[in-house]
Amino acid sequence: MLHGDVLGERARLTPERPALVYVPTGERLTYAQLSVRAGRCAALWRRRLGLGHGDRVAVLSHNRVEFLEAFFAAGRSGVVLVPLSTRATAHELDKILRDAEVAAVMYEAALASTVLTLANSLPDIPHWITFDEPAAAAHARYAEVLPADPFTPPAPCAPEDLYCLLYTSGTTGTPKGVMIPHRMVAWNGYNTVACWGLREDDVSPIFTPLYHAGGLGAFLVPIVVAGGTIVLHRGFDPAEVWRSIEGERCTVVLGVPTIWKLLAEAPEFATVDLSHVRWFISGGAPLPVYLVDIYRRRGVVLRQGYGLTEVGVNCFAMTSEDAVRKAGSIGKPLMFTEARVVDEANRPLPPGDVGELVFRGPHVSGGYWRNPEATAASRDAEGWFHTGDLARVDEEGFFFIAGRAKDMFISGGVNVYPAEVEGELLQHPDVQDAAVVGVPHPTWGEVGVAFVVGRPGTAPRGEKLADFLRERLAKYKIPNDFVFVEELPRTPYGKVVKGELAARYAQRGGQPGEKR
């Protein structure tokens, strides 16, 4: 039976092995110690708060040990974890908390202003628990309400029981909770270990946010399955990351292309000791081949991976030799991962032809929370999940990403959905029409450019619109440039021709500049 208490199982096998190093404090925990702490968190939920199987608990926090305790507590308790983006506004988080109908919110003091706004707008949430300082007098302190004894479940969770809800805005602009079952979490861990060749002596830093599927699925769960060590950073700082990679003798490291570019540009890159590194891997966005060459000149293989929240963050694998020989490829599908490239009629395409990438297998999520229409739309009659990404496969079975069929673009490794930004822009009283497109950027891969039609008699300005959006959207979603036009190009059916807008921007020599 596949279920998600991978920490409990690893602690049973190798209790004294080092599980975690927390960089900000230097704290070090064995698997036995981390497992006990996760069990106490589970006991808090089940015994002290009275939460039942399937109830939802949200976490709003930067990376910290307590976040890991909550994540692994979900694997043991049957309570469903709802990680929240620390970059989201209260306006965005309010929608998610209402949709998930959470019974408790756990948070850290650094986000107290957001928490207070949410607590005032959501008075029906009964439990607010802080990891450090409370945002309100009525909120409980985590350390003071933790039971002394860990929770021991009477039976493991079933494979299709929900482990967590990971929210994504999607192309509609409406947040959708991707249902991640225990089966999917466990399978990701086992299959990544087997196909990527992870070992119990592997040490891997995590500096990407734990609220993101990538932070949880690669490498957290796989490293725990293998019995290796996680080096947890609170956030990303190039100098700190290089110190950890060298000082903790990290062996495998995951990042997004923007991170690999920033790490390569850091002064430490030229002299840091990388003799213990087995390989680095990039995901979240297409990896420029020039970055592969930069790291190869430092004697390190930089692989490329691919995944989605809905189908698991690890879907492909390749050897270090193939990462050089097939630079630009995402590799071959993991074991028991069905992947193919299809045309518009859903027919498999021959090698070399570009079409939509689709998946089927035990790594695919359970669909979207309380949204059967979106779930049905994402899958065909044969059970294939349609990604909306364009790809090709060569004669040897290696896949290459060719682009995205959907409007979504990726900025700094984070998905940005234009429909969400456009929906907020259209609420400004001076905006009559708007369209957002992704354009290339040397640091962030892509950034947004908004094309805006002003209402008659108004004179909207880019900075004013950006200020309006900052109160409603996370910073990375704010367009880096605003172009004011008399009208937007549309098809006879009313759809904006975004390709024409992107071409116009390129022709006029648009320079989006740094992120706002």
Image (tube, helix red, strand yellow):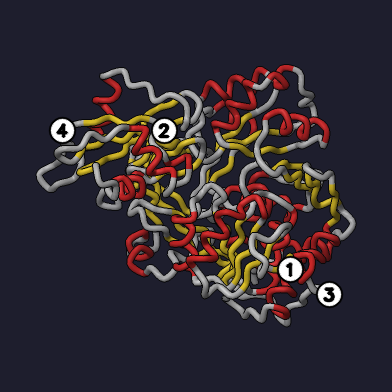
Q: Assign a secondary structure to mark 4.
A: loop
Of the residues tagged 1 and 4, which is closer to the observer? 4
Q: Is residue 120 above or below residue 317?
A: below
Which sits earlier in the primary sequence, circle 2 or circle 3? 3
Q: Amino acid at mark 4?
A: Glu
> Which residue appears farthest toward the left when viewing the image?
492
Marks 1 and 3: in contact by CB < 8 Å?
no
Give the residue at mark 2. Answer: 447
Instruction: List the residue tagged with mark 1.
Output: 41
Q: Which residue is mark 4?
A: 486
What amino acid is labelled 2 in the image?
Val
Q: Residues within 10 Å of mark 4 (few under 14, many from 20)?
A: few
Work out how far the residue at label 3 is from the one at label 4, CA to CA, in angstroms.
66 Å
Kind of residue sitting beneath label 1? Cys
Q: Are marks 1 and 4 in contact (CB under 8 Å)?
A: no
Position of the N terminus by quadrant: bottom right
Crowd around label 1: few <14 · some 14–19 · many ≥20 (10 Å): many
Instruction: Write the residue at 12% across / 48% down.
Output: 493
Q: Which residue is mark 3?
A: 149
Question: Could you tell me which residue is drawn at 52 percent across and 59 percent down?
Answer: 117
Q: Quadrant of residue 294?
A: top right
